[in-house]
Image: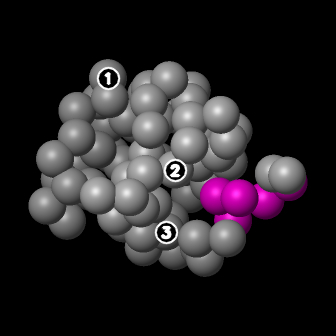
Amino acid sequence: MQKIRPDMDIGQNIQKERYRCGFTQDQVVAKLNLKDIQITKSTYAKLETNRMNIKVSELIALSEIFQCPVENFFAGLQ
């Protein structure tokens, strides 16, 4: 399973997209679980703070939930 390196600070971009959509972490977790992405609120919080690797499948699911291109998660990264 492919994962994004944790030193890439995409967690902040994920959080920005969540705020843009007006979702709480609980709502995002519920939507991910509906897409068969088994994740807890504490795990999701770790993704937003870059304390945990994120899977490519999770990024794709988040882009669908937030209705944004995957590229938005990499905005401003080098």
User: Which is more foreground, mark 1 or mark 2?
Assistant: 2
SS for tag 3?
Answer: helix
Name the residue carrying label 2.
4
Count residues near mark 2 (Cα–Cα under 10 Å), then give few for <14, some for 14-19, many for 20+.
some
Name the residue carrying label 3.
63
Q: Please state which amino acid type lies under the numbered disc 2.
A: Ile
Residue 4 left/right relative to 25: right
SS for tag 2?
Answer: strand
The magenta stretch is 72-76
If you read the primary sequence from the N terminus, does the residue marked by circle 2 or circle 3 appear first?
A: 2
Q: Please state which amino acid type lies under the numbered disc 1.
A: Ser
Q: Please state which amino acid type lies under the numbered disc 3.
A: Ser
Residue 64 left/right relative to 27: right
Whole-Å distance between the Cαs marked 2 and 3? Answer: 15 Å
Q: Residue at x 37, y 35 (%)?
A: 44
**Quarter where residue 73 is shown:** bottom right
